[in-house]
């Protein structure tokens, strides 16, 4: 939580409206406090991009797993225990030396929660939602990602309940690495497709 | 509706300005954490579906939708749904009218999710390789056919099966329609400078017209 305001400021309109709503819903018995805590705990501590990084590192290490993942991502990640809300139907798209995939939701904020957790602010913002489909190279470049001119850029607009995860290219120089060493390289942004996975010496 | 939320291809929003991944908190204020949990918890009462909740957030003046932060739109949507579905009055009249989940039930619902795949009731009209055009529509209700592909031609690359059809689901009527993934060339959507890029969009059968 950022604290760039003076603590003597009165609560904002949004804080007050949310507080009023929560008090009403609890008082009337429409929600239970322990359920609210369980929901927050799930997304703050259990479900997050570590899940997706596990899937990616496993796909890099195990060819038959990768083939199963690309053929039926929903069932394949369910076998690892990654099931639930906003991950009911999954497709994994693979980056190669010639193909780069990028995921967006132009209409709202659809995102594979079971593998990546809740989406970052920028993913839900108007600039990303507007521009990822029409000028993906410019958007990528704002993330420091420059691709060769001939690279086939494929943008996946998540308009249905199908959720998309990018399988990034395994970086060179990682031959013989263990799954857990590889896992540490995989960033959330690389699984959305806005960045490439880099070989960072300090990880090894 | 093609109002404030229908953003694909819109110009003038400036750069993305992402926070560095390692520094971004999950929530940026306590009220965001609260409205997130309240939205999920009240959704578990089963009084509205995901398309009704999306539509509740979309039904705002475009200037308001765009001015609001993400979770502010969630707050607006939840306030609207609670009022429209009259939940407070209903539970005051009958304290037992809703099954209100506790922590264990909430965890179970999160793990189960809400799959939208239905058994096929009809044969799919299209198959991979078919050329299709997205019908133009000025629906005033909820739709998941983005404006930027309406009128554009593409190629079916996948059939996902029959899924709940959002346009009807948003009115509380559960019905299925075949769902396809359609590939659009960048040049078709954005002009000749957009070569070597394409956009894949999931579209339901009623949105699509056959190109002969």
Image: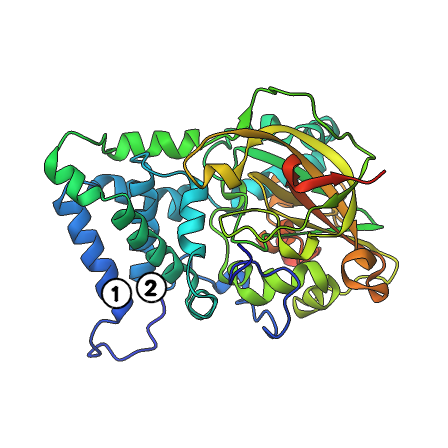
Q: Are marks 1 and 2 in contact (CB under 8 Å)?
A: yes
Q: Give the x, y percent position of residue A106.
A: 59, 55
How busy is the neighbourhood of tag 1: few (under 14 within 10 Å), some, or many (20 plus)? some
Q: How many circles with numbers are drawn on the protein?
A: 2
Rendered image quadrant of residue B188: bottom right
How busy is the neighbourhood of tag 2: few (under 14 within 10 Å), some, or many (20 plus)? few
Label 2, on which residue? B29
Q: Give the x, y percent position of residue B49.
A: 40, 38
The residue positioned 73% from the left and 28% from the top of the image is B125
| Rendered position, A34 above or below A188 | above
Q: Chain of mark 2?
A: B
Label 1, on which residue? A15
Quick check: A51 left or right of A96? left
The residue positioned 65% from the left and 53% from the top of the image is A190
Q: Give the x, y percent position of residue A53.
A: 59, 44
Rendered image quadrant of residue B88: top left
Between B40 and B207, which is closer to the camera in this rendering? B207
Rendered image quadrant of residue B118: top right
Between B40 and A193, which is closer to the camera in this rendering? B40
Between A19 and A130, which is closer to the camera in this rendering? A130
Q: Chain of mark 1?
A: A
């Amino acid at each position: 939580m950022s604290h760039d305001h003076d603590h003597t400021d009165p609560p904002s309109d949004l804080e007050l409206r949310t507080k009023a709503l929560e008090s009403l819903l609890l008082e009337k018995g429409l929600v239970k406090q322990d359920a609210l805590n369980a929901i927050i705990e799930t997304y703050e501590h259990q479900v997050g991009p570590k899940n997706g990084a596990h899937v990616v590192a496993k796909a890099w290490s195990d060819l038959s797993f990768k083939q199963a993942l690309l053929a039926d991502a929903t069932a394949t990640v369910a076998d690892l225990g990654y099931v639930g809300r906003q991950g009911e139907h999954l497709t994994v798209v693979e980056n190669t030396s010639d193909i780069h995939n990028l995921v967006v939701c132009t209409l709202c904020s659809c995102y594979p929660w079971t593998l990546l957790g809740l989406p970052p602010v920028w993913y839900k913002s108007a600039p990303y939602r507007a521009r990822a489909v029409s000028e993906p190279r410019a958007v990528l470049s704002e993330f420091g990602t420059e691709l060769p001119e001939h690279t086939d850029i494929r943008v996946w607009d998540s308009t249905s309940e199908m959720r998309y995860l990018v399988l990034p290219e395994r970086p060179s120089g990682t031959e013989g690495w263990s799954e857990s060493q590889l896992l540490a390289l995989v960033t959330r942004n690389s699984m959305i497709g806005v960045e490439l996975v880099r070989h960072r010496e300090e990880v090894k | 509706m093609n109002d404030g939320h229908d953003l694909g291809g819109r110009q003038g929003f400036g750069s993305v300005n992402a926070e560095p991944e390692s520094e971004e908190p999950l929530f940026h204020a306590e009220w965001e954490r609260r409205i997130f949990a309240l939205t999920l918890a009240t959704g578990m009462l089963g009084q509205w579906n995901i398309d009704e909740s999306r539509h509740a957030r979309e039904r705002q003046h475009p200037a308001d939708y765009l001015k609001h932060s993400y979770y502010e739109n969630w707050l607006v949507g939840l306030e609207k749904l609670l009022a429209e579905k009259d939940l407070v009055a209903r539970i005051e009249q009958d304290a037992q009218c809703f099954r209100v989940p506790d922590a264990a039930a909430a965890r179970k619902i999160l793990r189960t999710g809400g799959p939208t795949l239905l058994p096929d009731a009809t044969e799919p009209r299209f198959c991979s390789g078919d050329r299709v055009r997205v019908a133009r529509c000025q629906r005033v209700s909820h739709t998941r056919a983005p404006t930027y592909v309406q009128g554009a031609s593409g190629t079916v690359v996948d059939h996902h099966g029959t899924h709940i059809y959002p346009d009807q689901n948003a009115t509380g009527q559960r019905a299925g329609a075949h769902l396809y993934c359609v590939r659009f060339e960048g040049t078709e959507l954005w002009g000749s400078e957009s070569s070597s890029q394409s956009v894949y969009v999931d579209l339901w059968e009623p949105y699509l017209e056959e190109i002969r």
